[in-house]
Image (spheres, rainbow, N blue to C red):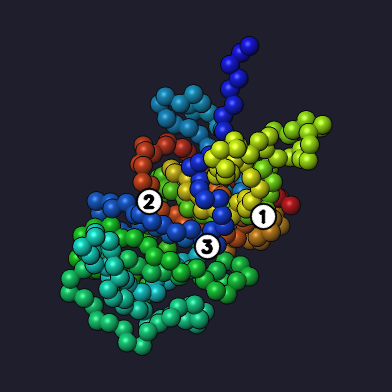
Amino acid sequence: MPNVRHPRRGSLQYWPRKRAKKAYARVRTWKNLAGNKLLGFVGYKAGMTHVMVRDNAPIARVKNQSISIPVTVIECPPLKVLSIRFYKQDENKDMKLISETFSKNIHKNVKRKTKISKKVKEEPKEFDDIKLVVHTQPWLAGINKKKPEIMELGISGKPEEKLTLAKDLLEKEIKVKDIFKELQFIDTRSISKGKGFQGPVKRFGVKLLPHKSEKKKRGPGTLGPWHPHKISFRIAMAGQMGYNQRTELNKVILKINNKPEEVNPKGGFLHYGLVKNEYLLLKGSVPGTIKRAIILTEPTRQRKSPQYELQSVSISSKQ
């Protein structure tokens, strides 16, 4: 008899498998770069298309040949700065919020979503870190939503340099071309598509039981031994599927442009419409549904940039 190989169903890397708290991702760590710059941006997923590129890498298998690559179109309306947050490290080496300075130009829909204290503290003299709180402008992208996403963005550099940059951006709009450039790697963080309550066959990919099985056909073959008298969390069970936060590393930006007519297909993107602002093309797919906020950050595991030469972008109808 051969040795039967039966790997477990479902990766334990993703745990717990429950719904995300918000419709946009949470960034827990920011990579501190050598220079002084903002480390992230937020865009909206518009749809997918394909482009023709030439790979000029010296050791590429398709060197100097035109190849088709699927790309995700992310519309990036400018961000507005809401406030500056000052953090101090405590005895447990945890960052604690000690003060916050708000911008004067706050949109009315942002005021509904934030609890702005009337007693705003003064700028502290000693602090260890600074984060920039920004809000998106979905009404500029044609998305039928009034309330924007509010999140923190990290800043690289020394604390004094971070404060100077944050004050400079406090009353200004931030554009994606000021942060990223073409043919660089970035990380994407987003919430995947929600599929609701699903059984173990669809959720974990377990095999169907024989048709003469008792009580169930689309369930696990066993729930485990009698002792210990409990069901292990490793057993494939029904539950929530999708709507989880997922991070994808090293996605290539093939194009950043502010001319929507060069990427809008005939009839617009399905369930989205026409791109109206700056946009970028990311190689490959990105988790999440159409119109979902995608957080773009500097790469945590830097690789050598590719040598692609963009030739054309498909604008054929996606209807």
Question: Given the image, on which type of amino acid does mark 3 rest?
Answer: Lys
Please identify the quarter of the rendering in which residue 130 is found. Answer: bottom left
Q: Where, quadrant-wise, is the N terminus in this rendering? A: top right
- State the SS at label 3: loop
Q: CA distance from mark 1 to mark 3?
A: 15 Å
Mark 1 Cα-neighbour bin, 10 Å: few <14, some 14–19, many ≥20: few
Query: Distance of mark 2 from mark 3, alpha carbons?
Result: 24 Å
Where is residue 262? Give x, y as percent.
58, 53
Residue that label 1 marks? 196
Question: Considering depth in this image, is 156 or 239 the residue closer to the camera?
Answer: 239
Dot 1 falls on a residue whose secondary structure is: strand
Per the image, the residue denoted by label 3 is: 21
Q: Secondary structure at mark 2?
A: loop
Left or right of 205, for residue 110: left
What residue sits 45% from the left and 26% below the top? Answer: 60
Kindly identify which numbered label has been placed on residue 82. Answer: none
Task: Name above or below for residue 4 compared with residue 309.
Answer: above
Q: Nearer the viewer, residue 15 or 110?
A: 15
Q: Earlier in the sequence, mark 1 or mark 3?
A: 3
Q: Position of residue 308 (x, y in %)?
A: 46, 37
Is residue 73 something one can see in this rendering? no
Looking at the picture, does residue 257 appear above or below residue 3?
below
Q: Which mark is residue 298?
A: 2
Q: Is residue 5 visible?
A: yes
Residue 169, above or below 237: below
Mark 2 is on which residue type?
Glu
The location of residue 13, given as percent across then percent down, is 48, 42
214 vs 193, left or right, is right
Q: Which of the marked residues, 2 or 1, is nearer the chain's N terminus?
A: 1
Q: CA distance from mark 2 to mark 1?
A: 32 Å
Q: Position of residue 123 (x, y in %)?
A: 23, 78
